Image (spheres, grey):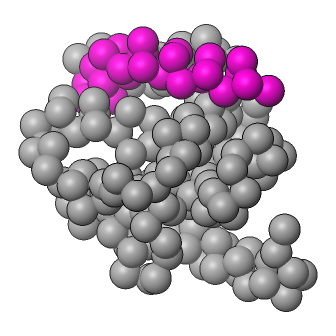
Amino acid sequence: MLPARSMAAVNEAVAELLSPLTVSRRAHSLAVGRRVEKVASYLPTELRADAVTAAYLHDVGYGYPDLGFHPIDGARLLRSRGYSPVVCHMVAFHTAAQVEAAVRGLDVQIFDEFRSSEMDGIDAADDFLWWADLSTGPKGEEFTLDERLTEILRRYEPGSTVHTAITRAEPQLRQAFQRVSGSM
């Protein structure tokens, strides 16, 4: 756990970074962060703080569009602000982002700048972020996995980028969710 003064600085930084997001997107991001914070003890000690930070900031790219793909926009922003490679990796790859990138026709090499073979345990941390994102509704409410997938598919029309990506990624999403659910 961070000392109180450090935690206050983290909270201030998160609030500032999330300020351009819509009210509901901020509520979602904060709820995802709180969910990971509650279960971070299941992660290796050295990944806990980064996993929690990434969870709070996973959708920050919506507020700072550059490429127009929020996982990469967010990871690049956070890297420019000095966040760790683990945080940037987790934001870039969150919740099957590679599948959505492929649906968008983006070159998968956009993820290369956030890959590292030196991140022991990162797969588990990624799973926890995916689990929290997939069990948190668009306004921060707690959802089951099926409720969340249904909500996303209803919000985006068939044939849209997000609808197509979620449909294609569903097996991966379910596997990550189950790995976390089964480890707690």
Residue at the image point whose x is 64% and y is 80% from the top:
13
Q: Is residue 82 left or right of residue 184?
A: left
State whether residue 87 is above or below residue 70.
below
Is residue 118 at least partly visible in the picture? Answer: yes
> Which quadrant holds residue 135?
top right
Which residue is situated farthest in the right direction here? 4
Q: How many marks?
A: 0
Closer-to-camera residue (72/44): 44
Is 168 contained in the magenta span? yes
Residue 96 rendering spot, x and y as whole percentages: 38, 33
Residue at the image point whose x is 57% and y is 38% from the top:
124
The prevailing secondary structure element of the residues shown in magenta is helix
State whether residue 129 is above or below residue 144.
below
Residue 148 rendering spot, x and y as whole percentages: 59, 22
Q: Is residue 62 left or right of residue 47?
A: left
Point out the stretch of residues depicted in magenta.
Answer: 160-184
Residue 23 rendering spot, x and y as whole percentages: 63, 56
